Image (cartoon, rainbow, N blue to C red):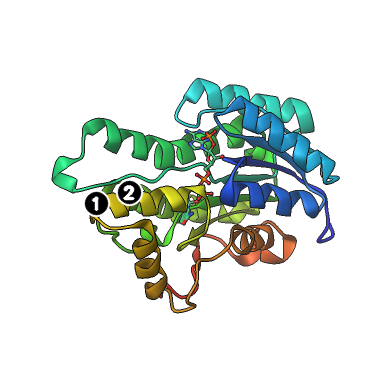
């Protein structure tokens, strides 16, 4: 099969930021993209927008914290485009605070949204999505540099993303003989609506302005700037290509040098 074999891809959290850039990048490479997020209106708007750009896209609302919703979503993807070749687990949320003050609800929601969802969506795509029967496949999990290094005031987020990296490595080794690769992409600071919410949270915690937080964060990045969603999507698209067949069980950063491993 050639580098440009059209595949069926599923992308979660694809109405904003990194997920939207990933859906666009995969669509632009000729793949049929089925996308989801919780807000139905945003899913409809995104599908319409990407179709207007000439891409083959469909989608439906899904809350990745809900197993039944995941089942319906994956079945709908198969009904729309056929069995699934590429899964990008991107949906996620920020969340943290002073650890001694974190409520169970916040902890559980971050773990459900960022980690449990990755297991459940992956299992559903392997079964209902037909991926476990295939000899070619790509599972790409959007983790974070916070999945390799601890982030102050981000214990639930860091724990969830370390979990995603661990899941990725274990499943990558398990599936390696099958032709299905499993990798994590670890963005550093990427300019998206989530990044804005994160800056607002730290500004409140440190009693300062969002501008001061932006300056503090930017100063930590050797490249001197945030990464773009398109830069993250570029690595995802590469990992989804035939050439990336020998890259598996890895956690690769797109972070302007913020992370060193
Ligand atoms: N931005 C960064 O600096 C950065 C850095 C490292 C890693 N990341 C990771 O990259 C991924 C995308 O982040 P982003 O910055 O692009 O965020 P974003 O702009 O806030 O977009 C998040 C997307 O996920 C969807 N989503 C959120 N919760 C969901 C749920 N429970 N079920 C289904 N969809 C859900 C959102 O739509 P709805 O709200 O409508 O559901 C939206 O489409 C996340 O996993 C994040 O942890 C981001």
Q: Quarter of the image containing the N terminus? A: bottom right
Q: Disc 1 designates what residue?
A: 205
In screen coordinates, is 158 left or right of 2?
Answer: left
Displayed quadrant of residue 165: bottom left
In screen coordinates, is 255 left or right of 71?
Answer: left
Labelled disc at residue 76: none
Residues tagged 1 and 2 counted as in contact (Cβ below 8 A): yes
Q: Disc 2 designates what residue?
A: 201
Residue found 39% across the figure and 46% down from its top: 94
Q: Is residue 34 above or below residue 24?
A: above
Pick the front one: 238 or 135:
238
Rendered location of residue 85, percent (x, y)? 70, 44
Rendered location of residue 78, percent (x, y)? 72, 29
Q: Is there any visible trace of residue 61 in the rendered image?
A: no
Q: Is residue 93 above or below residue 2?
A: above
Q: Residues within 10 Å of mark 1 (few under 14, many from 20)?
A: few
Rendered location of residue 151, percent (x, y)? 29, 59
């Amino acid at each position: 099969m050639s580098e440009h074999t059209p595949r069926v891809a599923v992308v979660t959290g694809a109405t904003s930021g990194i997920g939207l850039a990933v859906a666009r990048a995969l669509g632009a490479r000729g793949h049929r993209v089925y996308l989801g997020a919780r807000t139905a209106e945003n899913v409809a708007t995104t599908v319409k927008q990407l179709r207007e750009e000439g891409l083959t896209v469909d989608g439906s609302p899904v809350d990745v914290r809900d197993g039944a919703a995941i089942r319906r979503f994956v079945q709908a993807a198969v009904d729309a485009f056929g069995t699934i070749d590429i899964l990008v687990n991107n949906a996620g949320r920020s969340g943290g605070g002073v650890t001694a003050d974190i409520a169970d609800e916040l902890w559980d929601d971050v773990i459900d949204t960022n980690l449990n969802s990755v297991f459940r969506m992956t299992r559903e795509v392997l079964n209902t999505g037909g991926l476990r029967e295939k000899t070619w496949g790509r599972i790409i999990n959007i983790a974070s540099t916070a999945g390799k290094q601890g982030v102050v005031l981000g214990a639930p987020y860091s724990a969830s993303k370390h979990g995603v990296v661990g899941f990725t490595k274990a499943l990558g080794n398990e599936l390696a003989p099958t032709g299905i690769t499993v990798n994590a992409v670890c963005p550093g600071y990427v300019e998206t609506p989530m990044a804005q919410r994160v800056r607002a949270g730290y500004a409140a915690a440190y009693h300062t302005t969002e501008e001061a937080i932006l300056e503090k964060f930017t100063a930590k990045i050797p490249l001197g700037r945030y990464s773009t969603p398109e830069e993250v999507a570029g690595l995802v698209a590469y990992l989804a290509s035939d050439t990336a067949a020998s890259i598996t069980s890895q956690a690769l950063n797109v972070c302007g040098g913020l992370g060193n491993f």
